[in-house]
Amino acid sequence: MSIPKPDFTIGVEEEYLLVDLDTLDLATAPPELMERCGAELEGQFSPEFLDCQVEIGTRVCADIAEARDDLKRLRSTVARVAKDYNLAPIAASCHPFSDWRETHHTDKERYNTLSDDLAGVARRMLICGMHVHVGIPDPDQRIDLMNQMRYFLPHLLAFSGSSPFWRGEDTGLNCYRLTVFDNLPRTGLPPRFDSWSEYDRSVHALVDLDLIEDSSKIWWDMRPSSRFPTIEARICDVSPRLETTLTLAALTQTLVRALWRLSLRNQRWRIYDNFLISENRWRAQRYGIEGGLIDFGAREILPFDLLVEELIDLVAEDADILGSRAEIENMRTILKRGNAAQQQRLVYQDAVHAEDTPENALKRVVKHLIEEFHADL
């Protein structure tokens, strides 16, 4: 039986934090806001683990243009409704100065159970992420492509970094979110599997022991979706700007297609051990797009200006077919402008140099994040 050609449909999920427009601190989402957004967005909006946090998800999109329209509508609706309650959404993976000890999880059975299961680890979960689904109908092909995609997960992370601050302090990291998230079980880079059946057996070893209810409780950086015939990239920080989200989504989609295209020629990306890929994951988490990543074939650290051109060349054919050349080439703009973590640090440093207090400088960062959220709407 022949393997069906993938359609490479795309879906994007984003988590946002809600802030008070006066204090710029986190704010609990009023029930009326949740009800209005839920009604207007018809199943594409939901509360998240914390009561100051919401999640949106696009429909299944044929291409990045369709994803752009849907994400713009979703972001615009959340922003418009939130403003009626003197609130604003920000798309950053950590709030610059809020304290997780002052937050509360949403009172729903699912989240109550999660809080009980994860104990103290769950209480620090004041973080937001972004997930990208790419449609791959054949289960074994999902596993094969996931094995190869592990190599590129640090590249995606480096561009997405948006969480340099935690509880009012500069952590020195581009992505502090992962230091919190990696404390959960079943996180990090996905293991290598030889087949779907091997993956399925591994999942059911935990399900049969009633340790997890299903594979949705596996939170790797990339996984086969528990609900859809997709592979789901989960490594990225959420991006303040819509255009950055679209670039990361397009890069994920085109990389998956490029690896599939190689398979048509009986070629594949070399599989590296997670020990090596984890080193690049750390470099991306620490330095973002400023420090470069290791090219294991060349055995050298390549700066991102070279890595960007290599990525564009690798997926150029696929970007043209999928209609995402502009989004892919936007990596050059992000590199020149700086990723979201760099931008937040610049806002903070400019405020301090202007003799503002550290507290007010952090509030300026939140104002910047609100502006970035609205910039492309």
Image (spheres, rainbow, N blue to C red):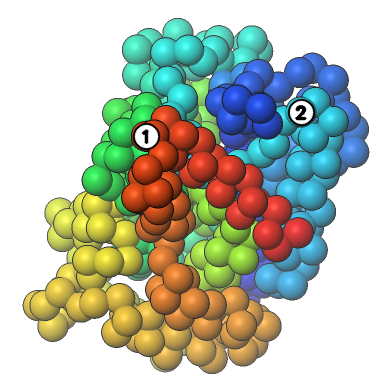
Q: Specify whether 279 is left or right of 137.
A: left
Residue labelled with disc 1: 358
Query: Label 2 belongs to which residue?
Result: 86
Secondary-structure class at tag 2:
loop
Residue type of the residue flagged with mark 1: Pro
**Residue drawn 31% across and 60% down?**
288
**Residue furthest left in the image:** 299
Quadrant showing the N terminus: bottom right
Quadrant of the image occupied by residue 71: bottom right
Residue, far front: 355
Q: Which mark is residue 76?
A: none
Quadrant in which the C terminus is drawn: bottom right
Q: Residue at x 83, y 41 (%)?
A: 80
* Residue 128 in the image: above or below residue 190: above
Q: Residue at x 43, y 62 (%)?
A: 339
Residue 19 seen anywhere in this rendered image of the structure: yes
Where does residue 240 sit, x and y in percent of width and height? 57, 52
Instruction: Kindly state the secondary structure of the residue where label 1 is placed.
Output: helix
229 on left or right of 211? right
Q: Are the residues flagged by discs 2 and 1 in contact, CB closer than 8 Å?
A: no
The answer to which of 243 and 169 lies nearer the viewer is 169
Q: Nearer the viewer, mark 2 or mark 1?
A: 1
Q: Residues within 10 Å of mark 2 (few under 14, many from 20)?
A: few
User: Is residue 270 toward the left or the right of residue 317 in the image?
Assistant: left
Give the image quarter of residue 179. top left
